Image (cartoon, rainbow, N blue to C red):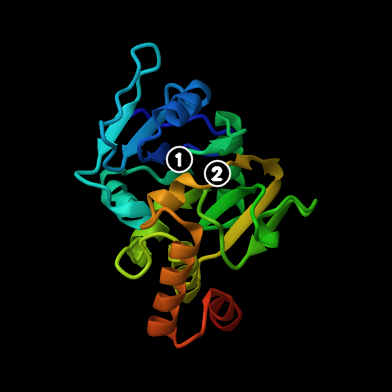
Amino acid sequence: MTTLIRSRNHTLTTAIAAMTYNQPGLIDGLAERLHPFLTVLDNGSNPPISAPSRLPYHIIRVPENRYFAGGWNYAMPQIRTAWVAMLNDDITGISLEMIDSLVDEAEAHGYAAISPAFNSPHTHMQPAGLGLHRVSSIDWVAVLVRKEAWDAVGGFDAVSFPGYGCDLDIAYKFKQLGYRLAVDDRHVIHHMGGTAAIAGGTQTVQGNVTSMNQSFQRLYGVKDWVEFTQKYL
């Protein structure tokens, strides 16, 4: 694994990892922008992802599709850098310079995780001219996370939230331990959407939403994810 050590203000190492499931074309597009630092988390693709010879990258292979949360939980213990860029495969506009800058900002202001803005359906993740600002939760699409904080909360709850909702649940766990989250909308990417849903338990958005809400009801006694955010975040 090749790690990024290029910050202006610190010597912390950053691993850049992207999860994929049966999307070699999307991964090749990311590799073009993030070579030679990209690590690919192959979440049980069939056939397995293979790195092209012209753009080789390190591959962590999950034995089978463990869905979004389970795939990341499998990979993260194998990554031992101070920061990890946890990327979906269906994003564009990300760059090494952006990743480096986000780590700098998070480190300087004491954030445990930070994200660029993007075309999220959730307002707090969209570009709004706020610059660097604190948020209660992050849509887990292109997140820079402090590995120490990730380890402290124990990663995602992959049993209760294999797909949707794992990012809200982990945000609550970060909050309980006093960690803070941020979005910096001076950096903006585009999220295609859909591939994480497929790798997240079902092939429909509604299927993922239903499963997520049932878990929030069971674990937190709320009717859905919206009430969870209002009550706990």
Amino acid carrying mark 2 in the image: Val
Q: Nearer the viewer, residue 187 or 139?
A: 139
Q: Quadrant of the C terminus?
A: bottom right
| Numbered label tally | 2
Q: CA distance from mark 1 to mark 2?
A: 9 Å
Above-or-below relation of 44 to 97 = below
Residue closest to the far top: 54
Question: Measured from the top left, where is residue 159 in percent x and y?
Answer: 29, 67
Within 10 Å of disc 1 (Cα), the crowding (few <14, some 14-19, many 20+) is some
> Mark 1 highlights which residue?
12
Residue 146 spot, x, y in % from top left: 45, 52
Looking at the image, residue 9 lies above or below residue 162: above
Residue at the spot 74% in from the left edge and 50% down from the top edge? 127
The dot on residue 62 is: none
Q: Amino acid at mark 1?
A: Leu
| Rendering coords of residue 88 (x, y %) | 47, 43
Residue that badge 2 annotates: 103
Q: Earlier in the sequence, mark 1 or mark 2?
A: 1
**Disc 2 residue crowd, few under 14, some 14–19, many 20+, Cα 10 Å:** many
